[in-house]
Image (tube, rainbow, N blue to C red):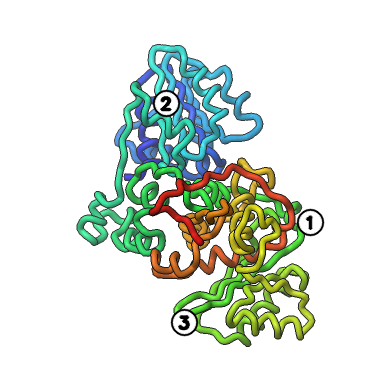
Amino acid sequence: MGKSAIAGIAALWFMETFEPAVVITTAPTERQVKQILWREIRYWHNKAKYTLDGMPRILSWDISPKHFALGITTSPESQQQLQGLHGPHIMVIIDEANGYFDELYEPIESILCGGNLAILFQIGNPLNPQGKFFESFSAPDVWTHTISCLKHPNVVQRKSIIPGAVTYEWVERQKKLWGTDSAFWKGHVLGEFPKMGADTVVNLAWVERAEQNKVSRAKVDKEQRYMGYDPAEYGPDDHVWFVGTERKRLYTLAKRGIEPAEGIGITKNLAERFNVSKQNISVDGIGAGATICSVLKTDGYDINRFVVSEQALDPESYEDKGTEAWFNVRNMLNPEAETYSNYSFDGKVDRIKADLCTRKYGTTRKGKFMLEPKPLFRKRLKRSPNWGDAMAICYSKLCQRKTFGIYTLPDVTEDSNVYY
């Protein structure tokens, strides 16, 4: 069973076992509360073999004024909504607790401080090794349970015993895409908190928050459009285009085994389709990209020929333009950075996420940040980080702004990531 199904059943158990009972469910997004957890509550209420009291609605289940369940999403009003909810028997369920805001734990703790029985039930993928959810795993009065995908019957026996659950094929795809030393593998597959990614450019938790974020169309329509194109270097690599505004991904496209002429045509079509001005198009200008840049310029496109090895706009911090462009993306996604803009990927971006969260960085002898060279990345993961490169190239024009954030330098030892 999935963890959300278990949480739904726990809500039913509490409501039917104690009287009066108060059950509060919450999660980082409205979708998680309304479309996932409360759907499970209604499903298992209907599946019950005997008649249960009341009828769960979209986000509420009222049996009496003192006996009820309520779904609350995170919003500016959340703290007010959580205040004053007390009772002799109370349970609070936090779904996707790894992404729940620490400041909202205070009102939750206040409503759990009284009564005969108070339970805090948290579920989630252990992605971020900091915050309240992480801290609960070392608290002496908390019972925890970890489930690894590798122990699931479908994976152990390599066939679909439980339809709809994790599969052996999915696990193998993630192993190939992420590698077994990545934060994604540890958090999503093994169910373990990863070590703090001190040597990866982008934190997995930042990207997964951006996958859930929403930006209004009205705001996006007022923003400039940008496009990045990373042509393939080798036969099996993807040609990747990334189109977005400063705060939202609009479109990504990948093609394999195409000629430069087709790449040029796709670039022109995407620029027209998404109304990207000619000066906001950036193309990796190495190898085949040099020819593509030359033809586009001849055709009147004032494009930015992006060369990763050129000097960065902030040469005191970054070894080259490639490193600076990736750290610019880091700052766009990092809530601690001054240039963070609550960026939205507008849905799942598995391949982009895999590139961003597995690309490592090191330091030079002069203390500058330097991106893991592509040959080393390819050696580790048997592929090229073209999807992440396309996003970094897309927003490279924003690198002219000074960016700040919390950086963690990897320990410099003989075996650490120090590039010369």
Say the numbered circle drawn on residue 309.
Answer: none
Say the numbered circle drawn on residue 120.
Answer: 2
Between label 3 and label 2, give the one nearer the viewer. 3
Residue appearing at x 40%, y 65% in the figure: 381
Query: How many neighbours does mark 3 have within 10 angstroms: few (below 14), some (14-19), or many (20 or more)?
Result: few
Q: Nearer the viewer, residue 60 or 385?
A: 385
Amino acid found under the numbered disc labelled 2: Leu
Disc 3 and disc 2 in contact, CB within 8 angstroms: no
Which residue is disc 3 drawn over? Answer: 235
* Percent coordinates x, y for residue 106 in the rendering: 54, 23
Q: Up-down: is 55 above or below 205? A: above
Amino acid found under the numbered disc labelled 1: Lys
Which residue is disc 1 drawn over? Answer: 222
Q: Up-down: is 27 above or below 378? A: above
Query: How many neighbours does mark 2 have within 10 angstroms: few (below 14), some (14-19), or many (20 or more)?
Result: some
Q: Nearer the viewer, residue 210 or 366?
A: 366
**Cα–Cα span, label 3 and label 1:** 39 Å
- Disc with the residue nearer the chain's start (3 vs 1): 1
Q: Up-down: is 125 above or below 53? A: below
**Cα–Cα span, label 3 and label 2:** 53 Å
- Disc with the residue nearer the chain's start (3 vs 2): 2
Tell which residue pokes out farthest to the left in this image.
Answer: 157
Between label 3 and label 1, give the one nearer the viewer. 3
* Percent coordinates x, y for residue 290 in the rendering: 64, 81
* Residue 402 in view in this figure: yes
Residue appearing at x 64%, y 44% in the figure: 337
The quadrant in which the N terminus is found is top left
**Helix, strand or loop under label 3:** loop
- Disc with the residue nearer the chain's start (2 vs 1): 2
